[in-house]
Amino acid sequence: EARKAGLAPAEFDEDGKEINPHIHQYISSAPWYLNAERPSLKHQRKWRSDPNYTKSWYDRGAKIFQAEKYRKGACENCGAMTHDAKSCIERPRKKRAKWTNMHIATDEKIETFEQDYDGKRDRWNGYDASTYARVIERYEARVEARRKYLKEQQLKKIDKSKQMDFAKLAKHVRTTGGGSMRTVR
């Protein structure tokens, strides 16, 4: 009570951090199975976080082995050992690899990672920002080419209007006796 009133100094936890006296006892005291002697907030902190879970990610598009002919147990459609015909993502062939022994697909590299709850659901895990930088560069190049082309077209239009021969102009007259509206006389 004296701590809450500000008369006594605040209590310190195991790490030397000050414990707010207004925090309830059931929050500051650790559970019995942690064997804590003093009140602490250490049990409230994230204690099993691995900040390096994003450093490991699937090697996209990696291939392992290129077979010369069809192997028993491989995908009937493409010939890869890493999946079966039902889960093949390649377009169904008219003549399958099992029967032709030609164009056998390479085996894909299958990796498994142990990730925590957040790691599994992190949609940006494994994202490489340099790939998007290339997309931006291509877009900027396209915009610059379009701008250059439009400038050239505008200059050509201006040149044509300057070269126009005003002597060849014919006057358009509306006729009252029928005929089309803008006939040349």
Image (spheres, rainbow, N blue to C red):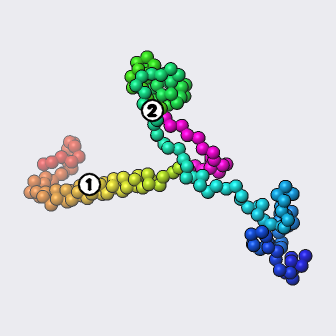
x then y, percent, for residue 50: 64, 55
How crowded pointer 2 is (Cα within 10 Å; few <14, some 14-19, many 20+) is rated as few
Q: Residues within 10 Å of mark 1 (few under 14, many from 20)?
A: few
Front residue of this view, candidates 1 and 102: 102
Q: What's the magenta region? A: 108-125
Q: Position of residue 95 (x, y in %)?
A: 42, 19
The answer to whether 75 appears left or right of 41 in the picture is: left
Residue plotted at (90% across, 76% down): 1
Of 49 and 15, the residue lying toward us: 15
Q: Is residue 27 above or below residue 136?
A: below
Numbered disc 1: secondary structure: helix
Query: Residue shown at 61%/57% (left/top)?
Result: 51
Q: Residue at x 71, y 58 (%)?
A: 47
> Which label sits on residue 65?
2
Q: Is residue 92 visible?
A: no
Please state which amino acid type lies under the numbered disc 2.
Phe
